Image (cartoon, helix red, strand yellow):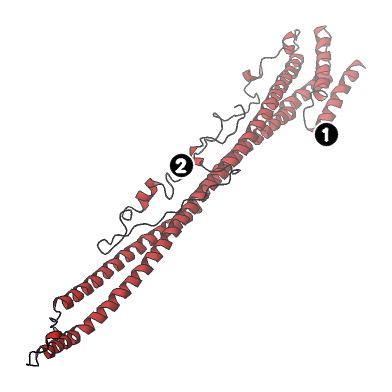
Amino acid sequence: MRAAVLFLPVVAAVQVIDSQQALDVNGDYDGMKATLKAIAARQSEGEKISESVIQTVHMMLNMVRGKLMETLNCDRDTSQASLDQAVAQIQACDDNRDAWFRDVEPGHANTAKGRCDFHNGCRMIEENRCTTRNNLCDAQDLRVKAINDGMCPVPDFSLGDGGKGTVVNDFMNCLATLVTSKVNAYQSGRHACRQACVDLAQATAAANVAQGTCEDKTCAHEKAVQDACCEYRTCRKTWEENYYSVRGIVRQEESVFQTQREGLQCLLCYGYGITNATENYDQCESPDPCDTYDDCPKIDYPEKNPPVDFKQCTEAAPNLPCEQAWKEAMYPNFLGDPISRHHCVPKATTCTECAARPAEDTCGGEQHKTDSGCNVEA
């Protein structure tokens, strides 16, 4: 009759475990431990334990080694998975960053480079047009000089022709010859000079527009880089904070798991003691620490904090449009004197700086930020 009374709590505990498939430290564990302690106490008093009760103890040992250990390990794996997921979310920030700089950033860079290369080409056209203008207008100046140098001597008409009738006539004949021999070249030369001046003015205007586009696209490229780095930094801050929060929860869960594992060791101690007819069970109430067991449920934590190294925005440009270093790098040949009749290397026009970010914008200057800004204690 007494054996039946002892057996009932065991059956009840097994039924609860089968329905919940989880270790309830306040239900299953306490019921099993009370049952095992009661059996152990009877055995210590010298009472012979029936075979049916021994079989029940074996069943309980199998349950501890099997379902309860598996459930505990499953809980540990779930916690490990949540921590791993928190790390993966941080890694995703880096993966997205890498993908942007691999797939998107080159488009911005190529656009800016293309427009700046086009500007350089425009300046070369401007230089060629200047050279053409100077050559044509210099040739015209020489024609004018030749006309002036070959100008017919003007007689003193007040003196008359001295009765010979040849002075005025000679002058008029000379002048007619000069005009007819020079006029076509003079007129065509003047037209060519004037047209070359127009062509040069158009080339200069086009080069100035191209310069502005170069600077605008360079600024757009830099803004895109800064925005991408800022988005990455914001992503990192969000998920690093989440990681530290999850890690704190997992640490608490790990502590519970290890306490439960020590509790299961207590059950195993009583169970093995009963099946081996042990008389002293004092050690069962003080099991060894969990970390002395090969199957202690331990969480694998990242070795560093944050678990993924933060990537500083090294892709940001060291200099921006209108900074002297940038102009020297981009316009090395176009920083001298303006073009003139004696100088044909173009000069870059007034530079357009990148637009300032709004005061409330937290992005910008990303190259100077060495971490995400997460201030959670590691």
Q: Which structural element holds mark 1? A: helix
Quarter that holds the N terminus: top right
Camera sees residue 51: no
Q: Quadrant of residue 300?
A: top right
In the image, 142: left or right of 284?
Answer: left
**Residue denoted by label 2:** 314
Residue at image location 81% in from the left, 17% down from the top: 36
In the image, residue 266 sits, relative to residue 254, either above or below, namely above
The residue mark sitting in front, 2 or 1, is: 2
State the separation of the CA atoms marked 2 and 1: 57 Å
Give the percent coordinates (x, y) of residue 244.
Answer: 63, 31
Q: Secondary structure at mark 2?
A: loop
Q: Residue at x 84, y 29 (%)?
A: 16
Q: Is residue 159 left or right of residue 341?
A: left
In the image, is 282 to the left or to the right of 144?
right
Q: Which residue extends farthest front?
A: 158
Residue furthest to the right: 1
What kind of residue is marked 2?
Thr
